[in-house]
Amino acid sequence: NAGVTQTPKFQVLKTGQSMTLQCAQDMNHNSMYWYRQDPGMGLRLIYYSASEGTTDKGEVPNGYNVSRLNKREFSLRLESAAPSQTSVYFCASSGLAGVSTDTQYFGPGTRLTVL
Amino acid sequence: KQEVTQIPAALSVPEGENLVLNCSFTDSAIYNLQWFRQDPGKGLTSLLLIQSSQREQTSGRLNASLDKSSGRSTLYIAASQPGDSATYLCAASTGANSKLTFGKGITLSVRP
C-alpha cells in the first residue's frame, strides 16, 4: 500500500514549456486534490475532483488544467509554464465523496522551478 | 471566505516542555478541523481530525481541541522531544467535498 504517489519529484522548466504532474492513490479514495505550497502563502487548493468524472476549481486555478483519468489517477497540467508557477505541488486524496469528514492523505510533493 | 491563522510562525522550546499550538478560523460553520505535521522537504502527515460535533481528539502525546463558537483550535503536545521538531499546520474543512483551508503553519524547534 503506497498511499499517494507523485511523479516527478523534481522538475525544471523554461518559461512557456508544458508539463503534466502525475498523481495516483491506491486507497480506493473517491476525492482527489491538487495544492501548491509557497513560502509565506501556505497551501492553496488549485483543483479538486470529488469523484471520478468530476473536477472543480479551487482557490488558484488559473494557468492549470486537470484530468481525473480514473478513480486512482488525477493529473495536473501546466500548458505554458510561467515563473509564478514555481512552487511545490502536492496531491492529496480522501475517502468519501461529498462527505466532509475524512482525513486527507498527501503525496510527497513535486518541486517545480520555472526559469 | 474561510481564513485560518496560526500565530506565532515559529516557536523554540526546551525538551520536555508541554506546549500549545494555536489555530484560529473565521467561519465557525466548519465540518472538521485537521492538524498536520510537515517535515522539511516532505509531504503532510495527518495527526488528528476533530469533527464539528466533537470537542477534542487524542493520539498519544497529542491532544487537539475545538471550540467552534470562538473559532479556535489548539494542539497540545506533552513532554516535547527533539523528534517533534517540524512544521504543524491546521486546516478547516467548510462546505462539501472536504475542501480544506490551511493556516500557514507553526515551525516548532525542540532543543535537546
Image: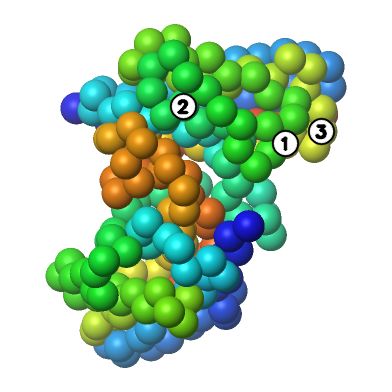
Residue drawn 30% across and 49% down?
A: A101
Examine the rendered structure and indicate whether residue B99 appears above or below residue B7: above
Chain containing the residue with disc 2: A
Q: Which mark is residue A83?
A: 3
Q: Is residue B17 above or below residue B94?
A: below
Name the residue nearer the viewer: A64 or B77.
A64
Are discs 3 and 1 less than 8 Å apart at CB? yes
Q: Earlier in the sequence, mark 1 or mark 2?
A: 2
Picture coordinates of residue A46 (x, y %)?
Answer: 61, 35
Can you say which quadrant of the picture contains the N terminus of chain A?
Answer: top left
Q: Amino acid at mark 3?
A: Pro
Q: Where is residue B43? Give x, y as percent.
A: 43, 44
Crowd tier of the residue under label 3, counting other residues whose Cα lies within 10 Å: few below 14, some 14–19, many 20 or above: some
Image mark 3: chain: A
Which residue has dot 1 on it?
A86
The residue that appears at 46% across and 26% down in the rendered structure is A49
A108 or A62, which lies in front?
A62
Amino acid identity at mark 2: Ser
Residue B103's spot in the image, x, y percent?
Answer: 55, 62
* Mark 2, residue position: A49
The quarter in which the C terminus of chain A is drawn is top right
Q: Nearer the viewer, mark 2 or mark 3?
A: 2
Residue B78 falls left or right of residue B108? left
Q: Secondary structure at mark 1?
A: loop
Give the Cα separation between the discs numbered 2 and 3: 26 Å
Residue A91 percent coordinates (x, y): 47, 33
Q: Residue at x 58, y 41 (%)?
A: A45
Distance in Å between CA atoms under marks 1 and 2: 23 Å
Q: On the picture, is A23 further left or further right than A103?
A: right
